[in-house]
Amino acid sequence: MTDHTATEVDPRQLVDRFTHTLAGIRGEIRKLIVGQDEVVEQLLVTLMVGGHCLITGMPGTAKTLLVRTLATALGLSFKRIQFTPDLMPTDITGTDILEEDNATGHRSWSFVPGPVFAQVLLADEINRTPPKTQSALLEAMQERSVTVRGNTRTLEAPFFVLATQNPIELEGTYPLPEAQLDRFLFNVLLDYLGADQELAVMQANTSRVDEPQVIACTTAADILQFQWLVRQVPLADDIARKTVQLVRATRPSDAQASELVRKYVRYGASLRATQFLALAAKARALMQGRYHVTTDDLRALAMPVLRHRVLTNYQAESDGLSTDDVLRQIIDSVLPA
């Protein structure tokens, strides 16, 4: 969708449709997903920005169910790849095969598209496959296209990669390359439910035979318009400067880096983090019915934007500090509550 197409829509009507559609999507997701409201909101921000999301959670925390339900509620095509150690890049992108016409005997190459040709792609347990196969997603995530045997094919818009990984299974897993991690807008942590919520899930799934039917609330064209709308949310100069300041504060090479960062951080966040944080903050503001970004938006989204982009060193590990521990102190220093 071009900007010309977007501007043909009355912005006020588009805002009303945006609000109504999001309420519908949330309602459809709640038919199957109990709790995890913050995670759902972060996934919706990802979609409204047009980014990709890495979901980190323990086995059995409904990561796959959440993504499948979201895709259905969005009315988008959905495919799932189960990443395994023997998965090949062509198992993701597709490949050319040589076909022969039985009548003429003529042979020709025919492209068989892989599962990446979907609007919502679930990359399940992405850290279970080697980096060579993981990198097959890089071009798709960044360029929205894939190249096979020198031929580039464009993916249908909108295109989202929602990847899951388990944090505790170290045997047979491969850490994601930093270049690929940087392509993800968020690294969302899917934690255990509270006791009452876990009871509700148990009762629902042991008493009913069929899952509730999830209904599509929007279309691909609507989502592209919503992505355009998000980018129209103004970012005040002081908020823009705070965004830049926060990301730069994670870099030990920066002249203004704190002693904490110099001591515990090996590599800070990239320029892409600055852009993603600003865009995500715009989406969150609009989703909350505001037409301006505040420092609360930055604080709420800084952790999932930065946690997979900041690498701590051996000193942090020795002192028992996680990346989130270090980031909390950085965020509190730049954006005090």
Image (cartoon, rainbow, N blue to C red):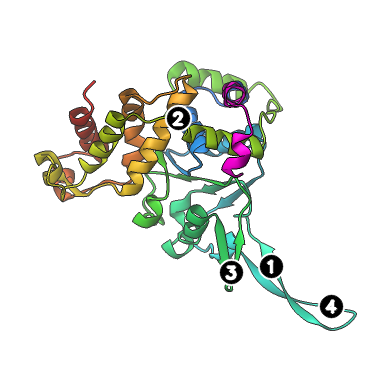
Farthest residue to the bottom: give it: 105
Q: Counting residues from the N terminus, which is met first, the one under dot 1 or under dot 4?
A: 4
Kindly identify which residue carries mark 1.
Answer: 111
Measured in 3D between alpha carbons, the distance from the residue under mark 1 to the one under mark 4, in whole angstroms, is 15 Å
- The quarter of the picture where residue 15 lies is top right
Is 121 on the left or on the right of 49, as rendered?
A: right
- The quarter of the picture where residue 317 lies is top left
Of the two numbered discs 4 and 2 in the rendering, the one whose residue sits closer to the viewer: 2
Kindly identify which residue carries mark 4.
Answer: 101
Q: Amino acid at mark 3?
A: Val
- Residue at image coords 24%, 36%: 246
Kindly identify which residue carries mark 2.
Answer: 233
Of the two numbered discs 2 and 1 in the rendering, the one whose residue sits closer to the viewer: 2
Q: Amino acid at mark 1?
A: Phe
Q: Counting residues from the N terminus, which is met first, the one under dot 3 or under dot 2?
A: 3
Residue 123: where, in percent of width, then height? 53, 49
